[in-house]
Image: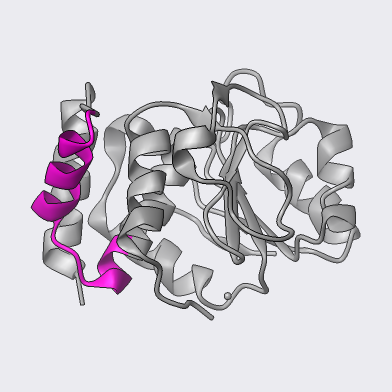
Amino acid sequence: MPTFSRRSHFHRQSVRQLLSVFIEIALVEVARVEPPKGESTPWHSIHLKENSMQDTMKINDEVTVGGQPTEDELRRLHEQGYKSVINFRTEGEDDQPLSPDAEGKQVEAQGLDYLHVPVAMGSMENERVDRFRQHYVTLPKPVFAHCKSGKRAGAMVMMHLAAEQGMSGEQTLQQAEQMGFECEQEDLRQFVKNYVDNHSN
């Protein structure tokens, strides 16, 4: 049973915003946008990099996803207007500047809420997503959600948005493919499809 530590008001998003999460993160990499101020950057104008606070995607005014921030970047999150941080990395992963617990202490020292949801790409579970969603809606917004590269964070946020939007898993995948994108990670593709099908409102 995963351990969730609590250290969020959802409004519905357009299909285009949902697809931007799925296409740019769950299917490819992490995208580059500005901090959570003003309008979201259109998905088609975003270029992808890894492991920088610049390499993030603002999904909407409530949540931005990205790769692992450095210690200095973590210390600046409150200056960028974030109210909460979600860490999807597991204990002991490579290239972690801080352990999840140490990251939580640093984040909380800034007055931000912190939620640790350990997720391994090869072992996603419905219950884990359900519990994340329950905690997510109670967090102060805006939220910065991250893992190592942003894929896990993007997939988790995308499933929440898809279920709230009332979309089917196949509808989401088909529309993504029609736009010229294919998912090379079949296990992730099937998990996302099945979860959205079974939990969509």
The residue at 59%/18% (across/down) is 94
Answer with left or right where residue 171 lies relative to residue 163.
left
In the rendered image, residue 172 lying in the magenta stretch gets the answer yes
Q: Nearer the viewer, residue 113 or 101?
A: 113
The residue at 19%/70% (across/down) is 200
Q: Nearer the viewer, residue 137 or 43?
A: 43
- Spot occupied by residue 69 in the image (x, y as percentages of width and height): 73, 34
Q: Is residue 11 visible?
A: yes
- For the N terminus, give its image quadrant: bottom left
Answer with left or right where residue 142 lies relative to residue 43.
right
Q: Quadrant of residue 51?
A: top right
- Spot occupied by residue 3 in the image (x, y as percentages of width and height): 49, 56
How many dots with numbers? 0
The residue at 61%/33% (across/down) is 32
In the rendered image, residue 70 lying in the magenta stretch gets the answer no
In magenta, the rendered stretch is: 162-180
Q: Nearer the viewer, residue 144 or 175?
A: 175
- Spot occupied by residue 111 in the image (x, y as percentages of width and height): 86, 66
**Magenta: main secondary structure:** helix
Q: Quadrant of residue 140?
A: bottom right
From what the image shows, is residue 59 above or below residue 186? below
Q: Quadrant of residue 123?
A: top left
The image's colouring method is one colour
From what the image shows, is residue 14 above or below residue 3? below
- Spot occupied by residue 27 in the image (x, y as percentages of width and height): 32, 31
Q: Is residue 150 visible?
A: no
Q: Nearer the viewer, residue 15 or 55?
A: 15
From what the image shows, is residue 41 above or below residue 61? above
- For the C terminus, give its image quadrant: bottom left
The residue at 88%/46% (across/down) is 76
